[in-house]
Image (tube, rainbow, N blue to C red):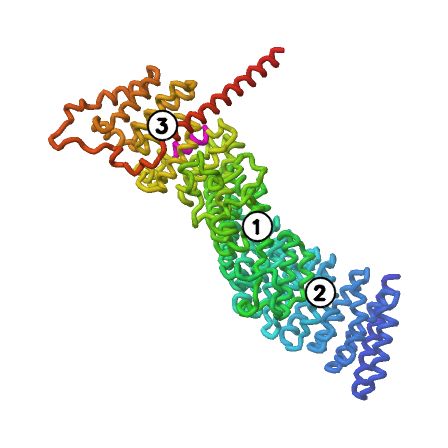
Amino acid sequence: MASVGKLMDLRVQRHEQLEKGRLVREFVAQNNTSQIKHVIQILSQEFALSQHPHSRKGGLIGLAACSIALGKDSGLYLKELIEPVLTCFNDADSRLRYYACEALYNIVKVARGSVLPHFNVLFDGLSKLAADPDPNVKSGSELLDRLLKDIVTESNQFDLVSFIPLLRERIYSNNQYARQFIISWILVLESVPDINLLDYLPEILDGLFQILGDNSKEIRKMCEVALGEFLKEIKKNPPSVKFAEMANILVIHCQASDDLIQLTAMCWMREFIQLAGRVMLPYSSGILTAVLPCLSYDDRKKNIKEVANVCNQSLMKLVIPEDDDVDEAKQPVPVPAESASEEALSKAEAVSGGSLDASSDSTFSNASVFAVTSSERIPVTLNLDGIVQVLDCHLHDTSIGMMTRIAVLKWLYHLYIKTPRKMFRHTDSLFPILLRTLSDESDEVILKDLEVLAEIASSPAGQTEGPGASEGTEVRPSQVELHVPVRGSQLSSSGTKGMECSPSTPTMNSYFYKFMINLLKRFSSERKLLETRGAFIIRQLCLLLNAENIFHSMADILLREEDLKFASTMVHTLNTILLTSSELFQLRNQLKDLKTQESRNLFCCLYRSWCHNPVTTVSLCFLTQNYKHAYDLIQKFGDLEVTVDFLTEVDKLVQLIECPIFTYLRLQLLDVKNNPYLIKALYGLLMLLPQSSAFQLLSHRLQCVPNPELMQTAEGPKPSAGSKRSVAASIDYTELLQHFEKVQSKHLEARHQRAGRGEQLERRVVL
């Protein structure tokens, strides 16, 4: 009986509200606005906002009836009609929420375009109903939503400016239905020709990328479509796009853990760099922070890796030589507001080291548009400090992949080529990590690292104090382990014959000698690096730089190396490279003839360091055809301590004599009369060797030496090799021999000291 009573009450209320609608029509005919407002107020306050649910339902029906009765005049009373209905959207009763939805549908259907001034409150209410748990309410809200979309699409009076703040707030909702509602509205607004949503894209782009990570495939697909439409619009009209305001947003999402978000953001970044050009330069450090790690992705993220590679290459092309001409210390010329915000963003990147967060975007969200055409009239400052900081951090990070390290080194090389003057301000901080990178496991990484180091060592921008800058003490800090107190040109003339020629040439700068010192220091501290990669590194450097300068400078440094064992090992390595590497063919020919003063100076410089290793000294004399001096050296071997290592090196030298490199030497054995010291030197080596395979090899070779009487011809004796190279007479071989004896005595003393320390250690162990 109670339910029947309620039903009767509801019918009575419905009749009363419809009766009020009839009254409203009469008031409209009489143009009695005060009575109309009075009726609406009664329906709102006494019914729609009543505490009794049946009264609220009746009030909603009455307000809808009033709107129908008002017809085209309902636009004058929309505020009074809509507000109480929207209040009922929050009612706890789902049936009442449905009635409110139905009432608002009727109000909007009658008012049509007149409701647009109230669009924000309608949108706000609908966004809440979109996530309503009741299916009937949700269905009703969808009908109302479609009606409102039709009205917006038909009208040209939509106030986008006032709507954007609400859209920006609602777009961060985590509810799936609310997100779907938001995306559907963005798609509608984007499709309306008179609404330019692209101008406000920076306000909602971050939220769109957040929605792209939704768990629902349908929502992700809708968001992909929306972002795709925006990107098409950007490609059609790049001059009107605010690239700068969205750059940081893309940087953030290019580092997302979600593959779809990361790939989409990376695709956008690729288009931004290609369309905006140098406008993106101030954000280079952030872009590199996002892009570089992607270059080492495996095939599971192949698409992201490929797009990231395009981004990296495109960004690199934006750096031009003119960037080296702008003095960052100078105050920039006054430019429009967009340039000012660009500079502010550049500074923010420098502080954060390219690691940007979402909060940084809001700081600059009000910046003016960055037109593509403005890149020619607005000076864009390359944030080199930020870029170098990012590159340096990636080189220090041992967990990054090989391709990322290669990309970092390519960037450094590119910057040294395009902006050498500015890059040399960072060279002192980069130098240590570049040297450490030589220990990398990858040959490709080492090759790129050597290219960077070679560019540093040869760039004119590194010549700080003219031709003699490399002799300054600032190039060789006292902390280095290789003790080189003075350069060759600073030594007194006594005891330095043949070393007048500095290893530095006009093509080398002040960092060249520093590089050589630190490279040898690295070899000294990491013997494994010397054993496994030493020859590879030096050979590649000989291709990238001047081989003569490399050997001259290293010999000059090793001459005063206090670690004699390392000096001997290093000399042996250099000698092997000199005799066997195809990269040093020209240098070998230069040494073989000794026709010029420069070649003779080089020989003397090498000889003095080669004295750290007796056998290599003999091989150098063989290479330079100084056979008499080689014979004299071998005579001194009788005074040396003959060890297993010594005999092993003699064995290797015999093997080398049989190689193509010494073809000319073997042919000279035919001319016995003019090369007696060559034969004597070879016999000397034979006498040093025990009965081994090397002994048999050399013995068989010497047995092939012809009888000089059989080799005589009617042409008469040929000029000796010494007369062919009479130009070498300026070399003081006596002094060189004395130097050899002096160096070997030091080595003997050092070996005895090491042996003594070994015996003391054994005694301590026994005790």
Which residue range is magenta in the image? 568-577
Left or right, 377 with respect to 494, comes to right
Residue projecting furthest to the top? 767
- Identify whether 676 is placed above or below 765: below
- Residue 643 seen by the camera: no
Residue 277: % across, % down: 52, 63
- The type of residue carrying mark 1 is His
Query: What residue do we see at 51% from left, 48% from top?
Result: 469
Q: To which residue does mark 3 refer?
A: 618
Query: What residue do we see at 57% from left, 70% from top?
Result: 240
Residue 356: % across, % down: 65, 54
Query: Which quadrant of the view contains residue 688?
Result: top left
Q: To which residue does mark 2 refer?
A: 141
Q: Earlier in the sequence, mark 2 or mark 3?
A: 2
- The type of residue carrying mark 3 is Val
- Which mark, residue 426? 1
